Amino acid sequence: MSYFPFYLDITNKTFLIIGGGPVAHEKVNRLRRFTQEIIVIAPETEIEGTRAENPQRGAGEVQILCKEYEEKDLELGDYVVAATGICEVDRKVAGDCRSRGIPVNVVDDQEYCDFIFPSIVKRDSLTVAISTSGTSPAYARQLRGEIEMILPDQIGPILTRMGNLRSEVSERIPDQKVRATAYRIILAALIESENKLTDQEIEVMIDEMEHSAP
């Protein structure tokens, strides 16, 4: 199977998790780092969330509906994760989703997955996704650990500062090549200083590069 690593906007999209055991819990914990629009359907579960007899899209929190899965439940989700651990149930969920055109992930059953969960490194706005296309999740986890170790401690706040600078640098340095060089120099300086570079010092750097531009 061939998976392309899309980054999709999931604003106002709801993830429906079918199952409430440890595997479903792990999937919910991963998703919580990106969204709270999650609905869990399971007869019983220890997943933290608001118990709701009539869960709603757009609630802004994890909602738990304690019941067995029924096909009509798919009306609640834009993306579905089948994680009951019961092969027949999970594959039925997959079939129901495909008949409705809803993307589905079936845990540990790659043949039935429309999308997969990569190993993820997330630091604020930085997201690194690692996948071996299901061939070796263990190596994906190992590589995730190695990436986490080499990332600067302040990389999240540094990238936030870089994002805040983009419009100013773009206005003051119209030449694309010079602007790209400016971004690299400022980023390197912020990493080297562990984000202790002041706004005034950055302003001086931008001013120097602005006046050196052709």
Image (cartoon, grey):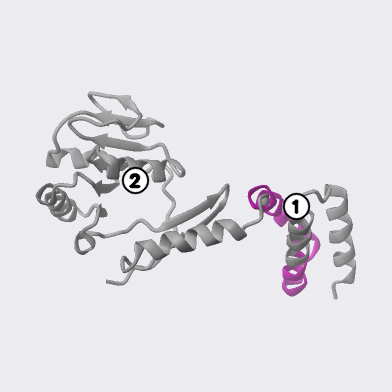
Q: Which mark is residue 29?
A: none
- Quadrant of the image containing the N terminus: bottom left
**Residue marked by disc 1:** 194
> Is residue 156 shown in magenta?
yes
Residue 93 is left or right of residue 141, and the answer is left
In the image, residue 150 lies at what x, y percent? 61, 60
Task: Tell me the kind of residue under disc 2.
Answer: Lys
Residue 41 drawn at (x, y percent): 22, 35
Question: Mark number for residue 27?
Answer: 2
Report whether residue 154 is seen: yes
The residue positioned 43% from the left and 44% from the top of the image is 11
Q: Secondary structure at mark 1?
A: loop
Instruction: State whether the magenta stretch is mostly helix, strand or loop.
Output: helix
Mark 2 surroundings: few (<14), some (14-19) or many (≥20) residues within 10 A: some
- The three-letter code of the residue at mark 1 reads Glu
Say above or below: 11 vs 140: above
For the record, the magenta segment spans: 155-182
Pick whichever of labels 2 and 1 is earlier in the sequence. 2
The percent coordinates of residue 99 (x first, y second) are 14, 54
Q: Quadrant of residue 183?
A: bottom right
160 vs 116, left or right, is right
